[in-house]
Image (cartoon, rainbow, N blue to C red):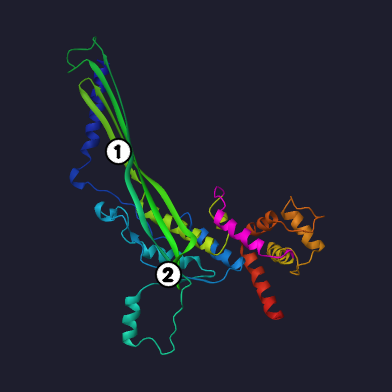
Amino acid sequence: MKIYKISILILSGLISACATLDPRRADIVLEETRPMSNITTYTQALEDLGMMTEIYGAPPLKIQCTPVGDNTGSSLASGAEIPRDVTEMMKSVLNSIGGRVVFIPYDPAFMQNTAGTGYFPESFSKVIPDAILSGGITEFDRGLVTQGKNIDLSGQAEFPGLSDNFPTKGVNFNASGGKKFGLSRITLDFNLLDLETMTGIPKMNVVNTMEVRKGMNEKELAIGLFGQTFGLKGSMKRVQGRHAAVRLLVELSMIQMVGKHLRLPYWKLLGPDAKPDPAVLNQISEYFRCLSPREALANVQEWLFLYGYKTKVTGKWDDETKRALSEINLKFDPKSSQIDLDTFTSVYVNIPVTPEQVAKRHQLENSGRRKS
């Protein structure tokens, strides 16, 4: 009888609580958010790449991109699950680098129509690009892996000593849940072309791929108490954005492409797990072999000045140069008057990338103009 009274009290409380909820007044509150900048994993890396072009004194790179889109046709077949055209993403990424990278849009129809209106003056001159960037989405594999997990638990207990007034004399318990996982892969290809010959620049290509996942989790709990049933059920589905993944691939590809072409240690901007690019290291090696010992030392002295040392670019050994190299490269022998490839590469790729180094580069350039 005590259990029966407790059950009646619980049911009465639930009924009184539900009586205050008018179904006609059902409402839902949506969280309001303000517009914000789309900051990704590589947003800062793109800005630092522009700074790196200034620090290393890279030549200006005027780059133009052709229309970039979905070459697989999956955007139509999947209901725009991936973007059909990513040209605007490319424009935003290239234009956000800054530094010595100049983005030139490709829009011949706009140029022709504007010229027909007479807006262009007679002295109008267009900037000729140094290279053309082409590419697209080349792979989109859906449902590479589909995995599901389920669990079911149930139990029952009988209380034979209860009064016959109860509909049942048992308590039932049931719990179930299920999880589903799916894996897809997106790949983008980019190539850099020479404008004069319209041929591909050797080794100037990048192919990046990214895995995107989706998952669902469902849970259900039910309790039967002497004929009365109570239950809870919930589900959650999460999908990693395909469009956001494409943007990340575009940003990463542009960092790699510009870094390769300008012979920059761009991998330092991608995080501690990034590995050096063999293509850039090979370019550094080829450049080193073309230099005389005096020219190699002069280059190192210039880079040491960017580090913050008071070295003079003379191509001659002095105490300040040896002291700076001893502090930067622990393997350097101060008694040696020779720059080897390892020292040359180590000093080059480890130049700090901060606004202070940009000021040092401008100081070098201004002093060179005054001498000339």
Q: Quadrant of the C terminus?
A: bottom right
Categorize mark 2 by other alpha carbons within 10 Å: few (<14), some (14-19), many (20+): few
Query: Which x, y percent locates residue 113?
Result: 31, 81
Residue 368 location, quadrant: bottom right
> How many numbered marks, from 0 up?
2
Residue mark closest to the camera, 2 vs 1: 2
Q: Which residues are magenta?
A: 272-293
Q: In the picture shown, does residue 128 fall above or below 218?
A: below
Q: Which residue lies under the disc numbered 1?
A: 235
Among numbered discs 2 and 1, the one appearing first in the sequence: 2
- Answer whether residue 292 is magenta in the image: yes
Dot 2 and dot 1 residues touching (CB under 8 Å): no
**Residue at (75% x, 57% y) in the render:** 325
Query: Which x, y percent locates residue 301?
Result: 72, 65
- Numbered circle sitting on residue 150: none
Q: Is residue 158 left or right of residue 372?
A: left
Amino acid type of disc 1?
Answer: Ser
Query: Which x, y percent locates residue 155?
Result: 28, 19
Which of the pair 185/342 is nearer the observer? 342
Q: Give the CA distance from mark 2 to mark 1.
A: 54 Å
Q: Secondary structure at mark 1?
A: strand
Q: Is residue 134 left or right of residue 267?
A: left
Categorize mark 1 by other alpha carbons within 10 Å: few (<14), some (14-19), many (20+): few
In this orientation, does residue 37 appear? no
- Numbered circle sitting on residue 198: 2
**Residue at (46% x, 66% y) in the render:** 94
Q: Secondary structure at mark 2?
A: loop
Residue at the outermost top position = 161
- Answer whether residue 114 is magenta in the image: no
Which of the pair 165/42 is nearer the observer? 42
